[in-house]
Structure formats: C-alpha cells, structure tokens
Amino acid sequence: MTDMKHTDMEEINIATDVLVLGGGLTGIKAASEIAGSGYKVILVEKDAELGSQKGPESLVGLKEELEALQDLESKITADSNVEILTQASLVSAAGVTGDFTVRLSKGKEVIEHKVGAIVVATDFATAALHENYGLSPADNVLAQSQMAELLASEAGKGKLANKTVAFLVGLAQDGNPLVMERVLKSVLALQEIDGCVAYIYAGDLKVASDGLERMYMESREKGAVYFKLTEKPEIVENGKTISFFDSVARRNIEISPDVIVVEEELRADDLNEEIAEILRINVGPSGFLQSDNAHFFPVRSNREGIFVAGSTREISGLPSAWTDVENIAVEVKDLLGDGKKSVAKNKAVVNEDKCVICLTCYRCCPHGAIYWGDKKAIISPVACQGCGICASECPMDAIQIGGFNDEEITEKVKSGVVSGNGTPRLLAFCCQNSAFEAGEMADMFNMQLPEGLRMIKVPCAGKIDLDYILNAFVSGADGILVMACYPGNCKSENGNTFAQWRVNDAYRMMEEVGLEKDRLCFVGTASNMGSGFSSIVVDMEKRINELGLSPLK
Amino acid sequence: MSTKNKKVMVVGGGIAGLTAAWELSRFNIDVELIEKTPFLGGYAIQYCCKATDECRQCGACTVEAMLKNVVDEPKIKVHLSTEVEKINNSGRISVDLKKSSYRPDSATEGVIRGYSKNNSPLHVIVDKEKCEENPDAVPEGAVELDTMGFSGKLDVDAVILASGFQPFDAEQKGTYGYKKFPNVVTGMDLERIIRENATVVRPSDGKTAQKIAFIQCVGSRDESLGNLWCSQVCCPYALRMAETIKHKNADAEISVFYMDIQNVGKDYAGFYEKCKTDFRFVRNIPVDVFPMENDSLSMRYMNEEDGLCINEEFDLLVLSVGITPGPDNSDLSGIFDVGLNEDGFFAGMDKLNSTSTLKGGIFLAGTVAGPKDIAASMAHAGQAASEVIKHLGVS
C-alpha cells in the first residue's frame, strides 16, 4: 500500500525462480518473457506436448498465432533458463511469495522446488451445445471446433464446396466476443470456398472486440445472411430444416442447410479448481481464477506473487492473453528484482509473548501471508498488504500494524470526539482506499459536511475493531459511521465483510445497553465519490439530530 | 544495463498514460508526462462510481488511485497544458514541446476545477477578466491557464503515445436533438451528473428523472458515419449506470434501446439477468426525438414483436456515445511517423504486439490504439511499459 510510510526497513533474500502452470500458448509466452528477464522458469504442462491444449480451431484465420506458437516453442526449448516438465502437475505449494516451496509430480517422481512467484496460465475448455438446440452430433451437425478443423485443411475445405451452412450462435448461451470471433472467422473462410452459402442464426452479436464489427460487415457484404432472433429457431429432424417467424416480414422463414454448426461454450479449465485449492487463491465467476475485484485487474490474485494470465482469469483470445503476460512480466520483475528485497519491519508485528499460535490470523488473512514458527505466527513482510484484518481478529491482541497501532487509533478516537457548538459529534472510521479519499475530496470541493464530523483513517475497514466502536461511544460520540469499500471492491477481498460483522456485534451490544441502533451506520463508499460521502454523512447528522445527543455523555 | 540515464516520455495523462508512467517509474526510469489540458486524469477521472449495494467493477475508483500514485511519485515529471510540437528521432528522441493551445470549450465561469482532489493545481483560471469582476469567488491556489505549459526540448529514450480518444460528438446525430433539448444528455454527461450529485437529475429542472431511455450505439457500429467498430464500453457503462439509478430510485422506469447487448464484466450472466428484470430492453435504435411539454421527449420506434411503430415519452434521454479516435491522432501520426488504421486509431505492429509500432522507440497505450474500458486501458499501458523496458534493456 503506497500510502504507508515505513522508515524501519530491512533487506531480505528471496527466491527468484518462477513456476508457470500451463503449457498452452499463454504459458509458453509467459515462460519466454519471464526467462527473458533473467529468471529461471519451470514450465509445467499436464499433457505430453506443449501447445497441444489449443487445437487448430483457435488458429483459423490468424496465421500470426501459429507462427507465434512455433517461434516461442523453439525459443523456450532452446533456453537454458526454462525447464520444461510435461505430463506433470502441481501437488502442493507451501510458503509465501519469495519463498514458495512447490512440489511437482511427473510420473512417479515428485520434484520439490523453491520459487519466488507462480504464474497460472491454464487454457479454456470448449463444450458444444448440441443438446440446448435439441440436436445430436452427426455428419451434418458439427460443433464449431469441428467446422474450424475442416476449414484448416484443403481436404476439409473440399468437403464443404457448394454447401449451405447454418450457424447457431448466442441463442443457447450469452456467449462472448471470442465465441463470435470463431464463428465470424469460419464464415469468412467458408466464403472463400466455391458455392458455399452461410446463414447465421444469432442472439446478440458479441462484437465488442477489435475488428469484429468489420468482420461481420465483410461477411454480410460477401453474402452471409444473419437472422437476429430472441429465441432459438425451430429445428426439425436433427437439422434438416430450420425455421422461425419473422415478425417484421410477417412470414415463416425456412431453410434446409447441408451442414449445421453448433456454437461452443468456452469455459474455465477443469484444473482450475484444484490449482486454486493448492495455491489458496480465490475463484471468481464461472470457475475462473480471479475474484471479480477491480483492484486485481489485470493479473493479480488475492495472494502476492501468484499471478493469473489469459483464460485462467477470464475468456481471452491471444491478444489479451499477450497483454496479460506482459503485465505479469513487469509484476514479476518488480516483485523479485535481483533477489534482494527491502521490506518494512513494522508492517505487521506479532508479539511473541501474546501469541498462542491459535491460527486465527492464518485463517483470516485474505492474502495468504501468514504461516507459523515454533513460538509465534509469522507474517511475511513481502506478502502482507497491511490491511490489519488479522490484528483485529486476533483474540490475544498480539498483532500490531505499522502506522495504525491500537494505541494511536484509540488516542485518535478520544481526540476525535469533538463538540461542534452543540451539533452532533460524529466519528467516521474510513478505509484509506475509499471513504477517507472521498471525505478529503468532499472537503476540498467544499461539499456539505457536518461540523462535528471527524474522520479516522484505517488501512482497511477490516482493521476497525469492535473496541474502537465501543470506545468511541464511551468517549461521547453521538453517531459513528463505519465506511468501507463496497462489497466486491475491497483490496483485501473481505475486509469490508469483517467490518460489517463487527458492526452487527456492536448492534447487539448497543441493544443491551439501550443505545439506539441508528447511532451506528455501516456503509459502502468509493474513493472518487465526494458527493456520495457528503450525502451519507449529512443524512447521518440529520438522523442523529432527530435522536438527540448521546445518552452516554 | 544501468537505468540511471533512461528517460521516457508519455504523451497523454489519461488512465493509460498515468498507468504507463507509473509502471515505468517502478523501474527507476525517469518519466516526462505530457498532458495538453490543465488537468491529469483524462476522461476516466470524470466517471462516477457505479456501485449499487455492491461494486459493479466499472473501475472508476482505480483511476483515482492511479492518479494519486503518479502525483506522489517523484520520478514522474508532469507537464500540464503542454503538447508535442515536433520530434527528431535519430538516436535519442529529441522532442520539442510547446504550450498547449487547448482551451476548455464551455467555460461559463472564469475558473475551472479538476475532477479529482489529486489534481494540482485544482483550480485553473481560464478567464482572467471574469475573475477580476468577482475576486472573492476565485479559490485559493488557483493558477492562470496562460502561465501554465512548458516550451522547450527534452531528450528521451522512448515515447509512449497515450493521447486517448474522443467521445463521439452527439450533435453529429442531429435528429436526437443533443444540445437543443436540455434533457437529452450523453453517457459522458450522465457520468459527470452522477459524480457531482451522487444522483440523477434532469438538467432542465433539477428534478429526479422517472422515465429514462438509453439509446445504445450512438456513433458506434454506424455505417452512415463510417464508424465500423463497436466501442466496447457503452453497454457496460449504460447498464451499470442504469442499475445505479434503479438502486437509488426503485420507481424509475428505464428502457434500453439496442442492437446487440455486449457483455458487461466478468459476471455478465448474473448481471444481465438482473438488468432484464429491472429494465425494458427494446431491440431497435430510434431515430427521431421530439420535444414535448415540461421538456420531456417523445421518441418513435418500432416494436419488435409486431413491427408496428410506437411513440413514447421520456423524462430523460441518454445517448450512449461511443469512443472515436482522438482529435490529435492525425497530427501526432505525422509528428511521430506512426500510421493510423482504417478507423483512425493508431496502428500497432500486429494483433499480438499491439503496443509496439513499426517505428522503433515509439509505443502505444490505451484507447489511442482502439476502444478500451478502464481495465483494458490499464492492462494495455502495462504491456506498453513492459515493451519499453525490454526496448531500453532495463533490468
């Protein structure tokens, strides 16, 4: 976190070898780039050969891809900095960034290796959606991959001469631009074959990727007919005829194609789940290995030193996978450097006298930055992001966060409860990533703010102890705001959730002592919304004015 | 190789330029960041947060964070109100800079303000005379635009072009009545309205808009304009803002007129399902807009089910304007001798190496090379930084 100023630094040695999981195009590119930066790379592929995961279907129409693959493969095979392990897989991974111990199995052998960073570069898997259209695979009913394969060879193309081909896309799934691109490439390739006619039955045309609108227009100009539908057409006798009612022309349109091509779903690699479990990284929507969190885009995971590339994190064509790999190359270089790393000594400090190794911190750390030794939990200064969730969850209060220790915050709570000429005394605990920024913005932009409001900056809402809230009430606060990032926007994944739980605990205690619930408010904010901050705190002041000043003071 | 003397110029201080500059500074490279307007942040810094009760991953807050990174980074030297005049690209790249001719087009007041608290200066005096009439209204620390800008020569080892895009000028689609009817706004206007007010109000009377229509693909995928690209950002911003509006005002009736809905975020399926229950989707792009009483707007469109035409009234009309090539692309293309593609964006080396150009030492980042959202612009800038680092041999 760039905001924290650490003066007490120490230099540590870290491992600089890098593990790349996945020997598809993305993994090969990652290995090549990282080795190019001077690091030793271990490239692990489950299959017997590199680059085999993507069949010819992804290569149709993009010669660069094929050339890129061949170039890179020969480059990394010749690179003494790249060790290639095929038919191999990851068994376990212990430790933290700069000091991971990974175990890899190849046949009966298990190889142990120290690495500083790990790159996950699995590919997407395809699944044809015949059933969704009431179709079964047959000579005239092909999956998109099969069509692409035919188009990749002269013999295959010969079989398609003078054929009428119907494509079904976007009617059995939402799809995405890559699904669309594969269809458009096939349509354009078919149009090069004598006598071929293409009909495309489509839901939404997913053209939100460079060049797709032009491909779509080109195919139309060359005679492809697109029927844009909101529901699947009627298909009889396993694709013998396709028909639908055209509401504008007010008539039924029926076609008898020679070949029908069924769209494919592109989904997360089956290996992802297992890899996520071993690496302790979070799984996002649809089984892809990255939480849906804007702060992690493009290539970060919830754990420092573990990066996700291309279709590991979302459906990606090669151009975006390339972009990911270049970003990872920069991240790896910045992280590992020359193997010596300057780290802050006081980022998160565990008091050996208080720690009972209960492992609460290990379990709650969203960054997987904590492990343990003989006498106490150990927080890696490289992996730690300084959020302070562990410090607030620790039942022994054994952890202190640099710049945000409990004493300092308690002092700020006391001095922050100030009388504003009889106006309510409001205390806002503000995450430094969102609410604190928004509050400063509201102030600088002269937006309306209550006179008796004071902000207390915390590294993450997850650092807001229940004690802070209770102390603030005892010190005479009339109203308290716990201002976190919105769900899904916490840089520490679930710091806001921890804060919400603690607020709920506080509500229960407030009820017991008869303090009105409305005096405490948990709310999401964004760093760029000074106006939002202003309206939240102004509303809070209104509510407190209705309740009157705190009975505790 | 030592990085001590390496210096890179980044042209453009929007999200791509900020990201590229910051990535380079992490490797001890000196960066000269050139921005033609008086503020860093470009368009992306003007966008609102689109969270409902949860984050919708629009990325607007990450722009704020990146701007903060840049202004706090001593290795990055920022030149505001400055533009490139010419270069000499033989050996080291020698760049002549001049004070920018950029003037805000609609400064009704004497002073304009940046969109972020991290803008420095925060206030810029664009009309001295107006300010002299009412000197008390001039904020402390305001700087005169005329005094800003850098003229002179800088020698650098590489240049990243990150001069961004231009939102489509909705006045070109005259039948929508943009700038004629007060309650016809663009997506860009709506971003600013929400950013400033934390809620959506009608420009004509400041009242909450109840019946709202979004028209997609304004300036994108439009053969009549020759704009044969999808802008990739309009479905996401429109649907996210529509959800924000609906979250604040459950009674709002929102219609989305569209050709094809493009995916929004990583969890598209779930998000789109919610949108379908919250809004009405009409697969037709209306053409004509007529003013009604109370500054409401009437639109004529075709109903997909029966092919019949319908007239309907709305309180507020949002034109989802797309991304078009930056206004300076042809000038910069000439200065740097890097070609544009058929759409007018800068052409990268090839599809896979889209941040490199055919000109050694000149790189591209962000929407200068084609439509991108915030996340994609940042990723592209990271890729550009990576290519520059390789080019410079920095280790």
Image: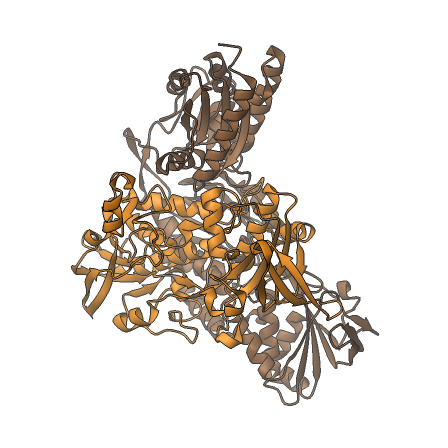
Chain colours: A brown, B orange
To which quarter of the image does residue A441 belong?
A: top left
Q: Position of residue A445 (x, y in %)?
A: 37, 38
Residue A508 in sight from this viewpoint:
yes
To which quarter of the image does residue B368 belong?
A: bottom left
Which residue is at the front of the view, B5 or A505? A505
Residue A491 in sight from this viewpoint:
no
To which quarter of the image does residue A230 belong?
A: bottom right
Q: Is residue B32 left or right of residue A235?
A: left
Q: Position of residue A92 (x, y in %)?
A: 54, 42
Q: Residue furthest front?
A: B293
Task: Give the residue at x 38% y 16%.
Answer: A415
Q: Position of residue B382 (x, y in %)?
A: 38, 55
Q: Position of residue B251 (x, y in %)?
A: 66, 44
- A463 relative to A106, above or below: above
**Image quadrant in which the N terminus of chain A is located:** top left
- B177 relative to B211, above or below: below
Q: Is residue B304 left or right of residue B72?
A: right
- B211 relative to B68, above or below: below
Task: Give the residue at x 53% y 69%.
Answer: B175
Q: How many marks?
A: 0
Task: Give the residue at x 50% y 51%.
Answer: B203
- B88 relative to A430, above or below: below
Q: Residue furthest left?
A: B152
Which residue is at the front of the view, A80 or A300? A300
